[in-house]
Image: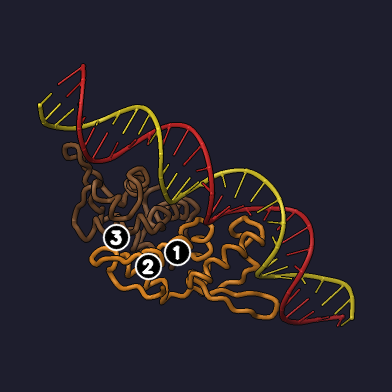
Chain colours: A brown, B orange, C yellow, D red
Amino acid sequence: METLHRHQLLSSTLSDADANELARVLKALADPVRLKLVNVIATSGEACACDFPDLVDKTQATVSHHLKQLVQAGILEREQRGKWAWFRVNADHLSEICAVIC
Amino acid sequence: METLHRHQLLSSTLSDADANELARVLKALADPVRLKLVNVIATSGEACACDFPDLVDKTQATVSHHLKQLVQAGILEREQRGKWAWFRVNADHLSEICAVIC
DNA sequence: ATATCGATTCGATATACATCAATATGTATC
DNA sequence: GATACATATTGATGTATATCGAATCGATAT
């Protein structure tokens, strides 16, 4: 499942498949560490993974785990530059999620 | 923590407290059963708890547990009418959440 | 008061998730 | 290829959560 429609939550019937898909994406956002990561990346435009452990006060392994979830949910995009991994927010996807809830 | 501001996630710095609060509310939404409940209640205007177990195919105890979480997160409002409990969506609160993400 | 019916809470269980230390993988540079 | 550094994965552990059956609470009607 990957297609979600505007206002679906409040004014049209949500199928089981849509409910599962929406829950999956919201679950990826629903964590304080991941929200901080998204916030830092969004306000910076883009950001290097190397800075995150200090920023959120978690180990490199934990940060990597959270970043993976955000990428898999389509909220972040990853780009390798030399040895560093850079991340950007997928604003379009985030807008879609928003549109479904609003 | 209970005050969240528009566009906070994408364009202004999210404090730890705000991240925790936002995560708490999103977590309440981020479940297929709870999304279905919110959807049914929203599209119906209001709905009686007595109808939910069949609708989402879960026991009364499970439904009650999910409803409690949604009420505590401020997403639903509960009203007792005789022996039945009726629920409505708190649209204002849902808009606020939305505004923070969008 | 008591019997009935809806809803919540309690107790138990199974699964999911966050976290970290250790290890592995990948990407340069020498 | 060997070394160095950034990131990902693995394995283990503790905590949170979803779920249900049973017990309890609340409200109504008899």
Left/right of residue A75 with respect to residue B33 in the rendered view:
left
Residue toward you, B65 or C27: C27
Residue toward you, A95 or A15: A95
Residue type of the residue flagged with mark 1: Arg
Chain of the residue under the numbered disc 1 shown in the image:
B
In what element is the residue under mark 3?
helix
Q: Which residue is mark 1?
A: B24
Chain of the residue under the numbered disc 2 shown in the image:
B
Q: Are marks 3 and 2 in contact (CB under 8 Å)?
A: no
Label placed on residue B17: 2
Structural crowding at the residue carrying mark 2, measured as other residues with C-alpha within 10 Å and reported as few (<14), some (14–19) or many (≥20): few
Chain of the residue under the numbered disc 3 shown in the image:
A
Give the residue displayed 65% in from the left and 80% down from the top: B81
Q: Which residue is mark 3?
A: A95
In what element is the residue under mark 1?
helix
Q: Are marks 3 and 1 in contact (CB under 8 Å)?
A: no
Is the same chain shared between marks 3 and 2?
no
Label placed on residue A8: none
Structural crowding at the residue carrying mark 3, measured as other residues with C-alpha within 10 Å and reported as few (<14), some (14–19) or many (≥20): some
Give the residue displayed 57% in from the left and 76% down from the top: B78
Residue type of the residue flagged with mark 2: Ala
